[in-house]
Image: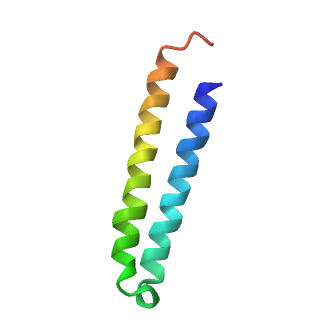
Amino acid sequence: MLPKVLAWSALASALLFVVLMLTAILARSSLGDVAPLLVYWGAVPLLGLGIILAVVLLITSAFSSDT
């Protein structure tokens, strides 16, 4: 159960990261000064969270006895 929750959470975090980065890249002219803030305070923490969740998922799967 825990690996499924971690996997879905990591996927959701990665998808939100992609959405925020595409918004910052494609709508840069209309966002103005908010675009860099969107990347620094929105996209980068989501990427970090996704990486941490993926590492925890790998660790829990390595020690899982399910086959």
Q: Is residue 12 above or below residue 38?
A: above
Residue occupying image coordinates x 35% and y 72%: 37
Q: From the top left corner, tell me how far across and down residue 36 is, in percent.
A: 34, 75
- The vertical placement of 50 against 33, above or below, is above
Q: Quadrant of the C terminus?
A: top right
Residue located at (48% from left, 59% from top) = 17
Task: Specify the quadrant of the image occupied by residue 55.
Answer: top left
Residue found farthest to the bottom: 30
Q: Hey, which quadrant is residue 42 in on the image?
A: bottom left
Left or right, 1 with respect to 54, comes to right
Q: Locate residue 60, reporting x and y percent.
A: 49, 21
- Colouring method of the image: rainbow
Residue 65 relative to residue 50: left or right: right
Number of dots carrying numbers: 0
Q: Position of residue 30 (x, y in %)?
A: 46, 90
In the image, residue 27 above or below residue 36: below
Residue closest to the eye, 33 or 51: 33
* Image quadrant where one finds the N terminus: top right
Residue 33, percent from left and from top: 34, 84
| Residue sitting at the far right | 1
